[in-house]
Image (tube, grey):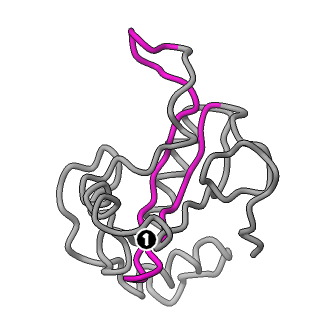
């Protein structure tokens, strides 16, 4: 995958197109020193009463994670990559893409990710998805039968 920085005003975000279109983007902060990741979303424009419609700080934004903010103050920025995975046109799609990706990589239950929660899930997840669960889901999606279980 080509992570080179194109000639766009995308701030520090690595993305092959001009950013700022649509509602926001899904990003990964890659900690190249500790080999860990953080996934999040960022809106291009404000949604609150005071900042509705105003451009956000997305070009300079680093993360909403307090842990990462602390690390950015203590370590060189060069130890991190800021990668935009995709831009989205609609708020619902943006939230869904974030949740889907966090679930796909099982972020809350692995040491590879700084994320400990999935949006709107306020409890700590301590158990990984079983291989059987994954295999059975794959079988369902491949239209395989389950007749032997009857």
Q: In front here: 125 or 85?
A: 85
Assign the C terminus to one quadrant of the image. bottom left
SS category of the residue bearing label 1: strand
What residue appears at the point 36 percent right and 83 percent down from the top-left corner?
Answer: 130
Q: Residue 39: image x %, image y %? A: 45, 59
Specify the quadrant of the image occupied by residue 147. bottom right
Q: Which region of the structure is painted magenta?
A: 23-52
Badge 1: residue crowd in 10 Å (few <14, some 14–19, many ≥20):
some
User: Which residue corresponds to mark 1?
Assistant: 37
Assign the N terminus to one quadrant of the image. bottom right
Vertical arrangement, residue 131 with respect to residue 27, above or below? below
Image label count:
1
Q: Residue 135: image x %, image y %? A: 51, 85
Q: Residue 87: image x %, image y %? A: 67, 45
What residue appears at the point 32 percent right and 60 percent down from the top-left corner?
Answer: 68
User: Is-magenta flag for residue 5?
Assistant: no
Going by the image, does 135 lie left or right of 7?
left
The outermost residue toward the top is: 49
What residue appears at the point 49 percent right and 52 percent down from the top-left corner?
Answer: 98
Specify the quadrant of the image occupied by residue 74. bottom left
Vertical arrangement, residue 149 with respect to residue 104, above or below? below
Q: Residue 73: image x %, image y %? A: 30, 58
Q: In front here: 115 or 142?
A: 115
């Amino acid at each position: 995958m080509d992570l080179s920085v194109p000639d766009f005003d995308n701030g520090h975000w690595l993305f092959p197109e001009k950013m700022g279109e649509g509602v926001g983007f899904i990003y990964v902060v890659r900690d190249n020193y500790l080999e860990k990741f953080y996934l999040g979303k960022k809106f291009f424009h404000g949604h609150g009463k005071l900042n509705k419609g105003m451009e956000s700080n997305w070009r300079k934004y680093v993360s909403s994670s307090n842990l990462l903010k602390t690390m950015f103050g203590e370590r060189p920025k060069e130890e991190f990559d800021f990668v935009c995975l995709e831009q989205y046109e609609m708020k619902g799609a943006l939230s869904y893409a974030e949740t889907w990706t966090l679930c796909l990589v099982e972020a809350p239950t692995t040491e590879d990710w700084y994320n400990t929660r999935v949006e709107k899930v306020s409890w700590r997840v301590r158990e990984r998805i079983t291989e059987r669960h994954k295999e059975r889901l794959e079988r369902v999606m491949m239209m395989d039968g389950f007749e032997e279980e009857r």
